[in-house]
Image (cartoon, rainbow, N blue to C red):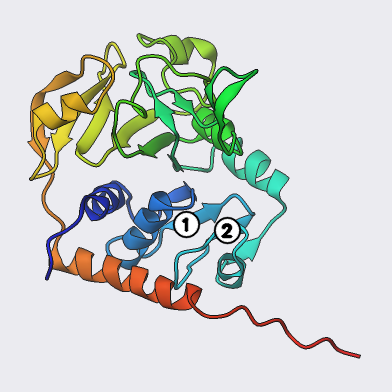
Amino acid sequence: MTPATRNEWMTVAAARMLWNGCVCFVGIGLPSAACNLARLTHAPDIVLIYESGTIGTRPDVLPLSIGDGELAETAAFVVPLPEVFSHYLQGGRVDVGFLGAAQVDRFGNLNSTVIGSYASPATRLPGAGGAPEIAAHAGRTFVMVKASRRSFVEQLDFRTSAGFGTGAGARARSGARGGGPRAVITDFGILSPHPDTEELQLTALFADATMEEARAAVGWPLALAEAVDRVPPPTAHELDTLRALHARTREAHAQPVVLPSPTR
């Protein structure tokens, strides 16, 4: 078996944070891979919700987007989008929200709107979608972002989704119901908020990563937890399951699109 890539380390580390039976609001990409890996290994009864309104979906391959038919075909049921947010998310029924972003700051606030000024941006990003509501209401959020000084910044160009604000209780004072970002999973390890300051600190490293690498990839002076753990490497079972999932996905997505013949 070939050694695990950093993407695989990230996916496995994130999957392990999920538990059987938890209700998880899933994003496309690495979060989707992590949640489905958890479902296929240690958490078979995880309830996956995608923003298109699919509840309890169990896809055989990873979806291309939230509108992928695979999600609706394998869902326990499908509800209108407003109901996902009002009855599930705002109703306090979502345990975990998985988010990505273009930028993360030291307090776990996220930017997925623009790079540069809002009026005249250098890059216009996909935008907020449901991320602000997920960040505000989910019982906890996990963020998955590959680390660089372009993505882990001292100051966001735009705050799309709130983490811990300016830290030290700012989130609690804001009235946000959810628990905020409990972990940021990067391609060198895991950052978690300090219990008092709420600033992200390095709490765990992948086996082949170093503290120097972590500090070099972050755009602020990265603090270290009192004990920085080593993330156990992916097991053969985890890697086999994840790679088989990706192989099925590649094969499915390589098939030509065939539309049904029109009926007369």
Where does the image place residue 103, in percent across and percent down from the top left? 42, 28
Amino acid at the residue labelled 2? Ile
Which disc is residue 255 wearing? none
Lateral position of residue 59 relative to residue 41, left or right: right
With respect to residue 73, does 188 lie above or below? above
Where does the image place residue 31, in percent across and percent down from the top left? 40, 50
In the picture, which quadrant includes the N terminus? bottom left
Check whether the beta carbons of the residues at disc 2 and disc 1 lie within 8 A of each other: yes
Q: Dividing the picture into quarters, in which one does residue 189 lie?
A: top left
Lateral position of residue 22 relative to residue 118, left or right: left
**Which class describes the residues within 10 Å of circle 1: few (<14), some (14-19), or many (20+)?**
many
Q: Report the label total.
A: 2
Query: What residue is drawn where x is 36% and y is 18%?
Result: 107
Query: What residue is drawn where x is 53% and y is 36%?
Result: 134
Residue projecting furthest to the bottom:
264
Amino acid at the residue labelled 1? Val
With respect to residue 227, does 86 lie above or below? below
**Which class describes the residues within 10 Å of circle 2: few (<14), some (14-19), or many (20+)?**
many
The residue that disc 2 covers is 55
Question: Is label 2 in a helix, a strand or a loop?
Answer: strand
The residue that disc 1 covers is 47
